[in-house]
Image: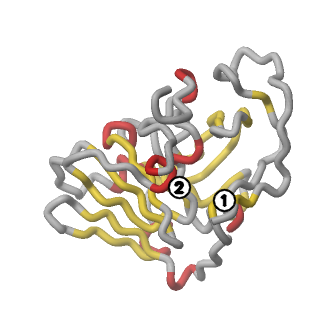
Amino acid sequence: MGIISRGFGGRRRDSAPDLPPGQYLTHDFPVLSAGPTPRIPLDRWSFTIATEVGQKHTWDWKAFTALPAEEITKDIHCVTKWSKLGTTWKGVSLDTLFEEVETAADYVMAHSKGGYTTNVPFEDLLDGKAWIAYEFDGEPLDPEHGGPARLLIPHLYFWKSAKWVNGLQMLLEDEPGFWEAAGYHMYGDPWSEQRYSGD
């Protein structure tokens, strides 16, 4: 699979106290994707949480956007070394989505349209740390940035914030997702520079 990197070019790190080590500041929003950009009609969109015992909780677009939403302003950090500060999103907190879900799992595999996956510890989705975002800068989320909805976990490298997310699978044991199986770090903390396996 090719990497789409329209609008992206390497640069020196800017001096900014809000940047993790090894990062530079960007004011644009680079597009980096593994594979083509899917176009998902809202009447065909759904999001499912599947527990480790097979219970499924599913929302269509109407039910999902009827849930309480939050405006979130966070810095985001890409493993390719760009950081964008003060990004503004609107979305549904994972705390809200998990209110009715019973699980004993410690790990989650995020699934996206097109087969992309990424793994995350369950605790990193709770306590106001993660959202399913469907707006960026007050506008519907563009498909090239993961619209109609993407996972948003801003405290981890941005590959963990899966574009075109359509479900979460609860896991009792951690498993690598797409990039993790290709050598990226299993966790991905930008402040510890956990870019690749062994970092």
The total number of labels drawn is 2
| Whole-percent x, y for residue 152 in the image | 53, 48
Tell me which amino acid carries mark 1.
Ser
Q: Residues within 10 Å of mark 2 (few under 14, many from 20)?
A: many
Q: Give the structural element (helix, strand or loop) at label 2.
A: loop
Q: Is residue 54 left or right of residue 25?
A: left
* Residue that appears at 78% across and 48% down: 29
Q: Nearer the viewer, residue 178 or 191?
A: 178
Q: Is residue 199 left or right of residue 12?
A: left
| Residue 131: numbered disc | none
| Residue 33: numbered disc | 1
Q: Give the structural element (helix, strand or loop) at label 1.
A: strand
Q: Is residue 69 visible?
A: no
| Whole-percent x, y for residue 119 in the image | 39, 49
- Residue 167 placement: quadrant: bottom left
* Residue that appears at 49% across and 74% down: 61
Task: Name the N-terminal-most of marks 2 and 1.
Answer: 1
**Disc 2 versus disc 1: distance between alpha carbons?**
10 Å
| Residue 162: numbered disc | 2
Q: Nearer the viewer, residue 86 or 182?
A: 182
Colouring: secondary structure
